[in-house]
Amino acid sequence: MRYISFAFISFALDTTVLIFLRSFAHVEVGVAAVLANAVGFGANFALNRAFAFDGARAATVTPQFFQWVALFVLNLLMTGGIVQGLSLVWPYYTLSKVVATIVTQVVNYLIYRYWIFTPRRLEISVEEAPGG
């Protein structure tokens, strides 16, 4: 449930930054979309690492960060492909962005759960244990 809450928070942040960059800062739409996505995606990573996945805090942040960068690139490609592909079906790019967000959040959950924030278990055999 926490993951879904953080997904909504990051989507709201992404959308708010996108609107700000387009409407007030007059940033080109493609650049604004990438920047907004990076802000929302970064917030999502931080929230999930801190509160949603138990195994997240067991590992150091450096490898998780590089895994997150790989996931971020995948998300950019997926979002671009989905939005572009759905533009062939209908003219509603905002609805296409919502569809892309739903799809990527499902993929993100699986990747966070089974790759980035996998609990790293420390296994010590009897022979290796102190005094063993």
Image (cartoon, grey):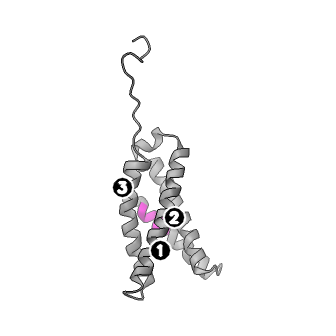
Determine the image quadrant of residue 121.
top left
Amino acid type at circle 2 is Gly
**What residue is at 48 percent from the left and 40 percent from the top?**
59
The N terminus, quarter of image: bottom left
Helix, strand or loop at mark 3 = helix
Helix, strand or loop at mark 1 = helix
Amino acid type at circle 3 is Leu
Nearest the eye: 40 or 93: 93
Vertical placement of residue 3 versus 85, above or below? above
Ranked by sequence position, the earlier of labels 1 and 2 is 2
Q: Which residue is mark 2?
A: 40
Q: Which residue is mark 1?
A: 80
**What residue is at 49 percent from the left and 52 percent from the top?**
67
Which percent across, then down, holds residue 47?
Answer: 48, 53
State the separation of the CA atoms marked 1 and 3.
Answer: 20 Å
State the separation of the CA atoms marked 1 and 2.
Answer: 16 Å
Q: Which residue is mark 3?
A: 110
Q: Main secondary structure of the magenta part?
A: helix
Vertical placement of residue 110 versus 125, above or below? below
State the separation of the CA atoms marked 3 and 2.
Answer: 18 Å
Q: Residue furthest bottom?
A: 91
